Amino acid sequence: MDLLTPELDAYLVAHSDPADDLLRDLAAETAAAFPDAARMQISHDEGEFLTMLVRLVGARSAVEVGVFTGYSSICLARGLADGGTLLACDVSEEWTDIARKYWDRAGLADRIELRVAPALETLRALPTDPVIDFAFIDADKVGYAGYYGELVPRLRPGGLIVLDNVLQGGRVVDPAEQGDAVRAIREVNDLVVADERVDAVMLPVRDGVTLARKR
């Protein structure tokens, strides 16, 4: 989703820390291997935003729902405090084979635990103790409400959940749009803003991100 003019977009990117060779190589390999799905990869400025948020939270325990080829995983893991770990959930061996390769190259493989299984099953199997510091949801949109519902009780006070693609290319405000993904995102957007367990703000970062901080 383009909320900025091309000139402002280029200015924004130019004034964020640039991608390193590893991330550029990952983006290029993803585009070559999965041209029809490459748009699912987050932009680099959003990746830098995630790294910054993880660092600001001081996260040691993080969860990612939706790995794809691992770009966001690298950004999240790079922000973790010493000794921190990231539980990465996805259903595709094909996509995550590329992720594993780049996690190794980044020197982050020991910080990332991959679970290839339906994410809802993985989350429900976690202990119910509120020990998670940070969570990032960027997977199938129909599943967002379920993922959010499992993560909030496991988030420690002051912990943060970030939900991606909450604007759905602007379709969330178009009543004519009644596809499953758009309807699911409307549902979770309404759910989060009404949830008294969190403080929430929606930001126009790329296709929209919501930050929900556990009270």
Image (cartoon, rainbow, N blue to C red):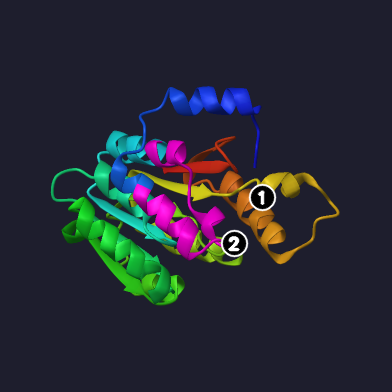
**Exactly how many numbered labels are in the figure?**
2
Please give the name of the residue rendered at 21% of the width and 55% of the height, measured from the top-left corner: 105
Residue at 62 percent of width and 49 percent of height = 189
Q: The disc labelled 2 sits on which kind of residue?
A: Lys
The answer to whether the residue labelled 1 contacts the one labelled 2, judged by CB atoms less than 8 Å apart, is yes
Q: In which quarter of the image is residue 95?
A: bottom left
Compare residues 122 and 199 and report the one nearer the observer.
122
- Label 2, secondary structure: give it: helix
Between marks 1 and 2, how big is the CA–CA gap? 10 Å
Question: Residue 131 or 61: which is nearer the viewer?
Answer: 61
Q: Is residue 138 magenta?
A: no
Q: Which badge, 1 or 2, comes first in the chain's sequence?
A: 2
Residue 135 visible within the image: no
Looking at the picture, does residue 45 appear above or below residue 116?
above
Q: Residue 141 carries which label?
A: 2
Q: What stretch is highlighted in magenta?
A: 25-48
What residue type is disc 1 on? Gln
User: For mark 2, does the 10 Å Cα neighbourhood hold few (<14), some (14 to 19), or many (20 or more) residues?
Assistant: many
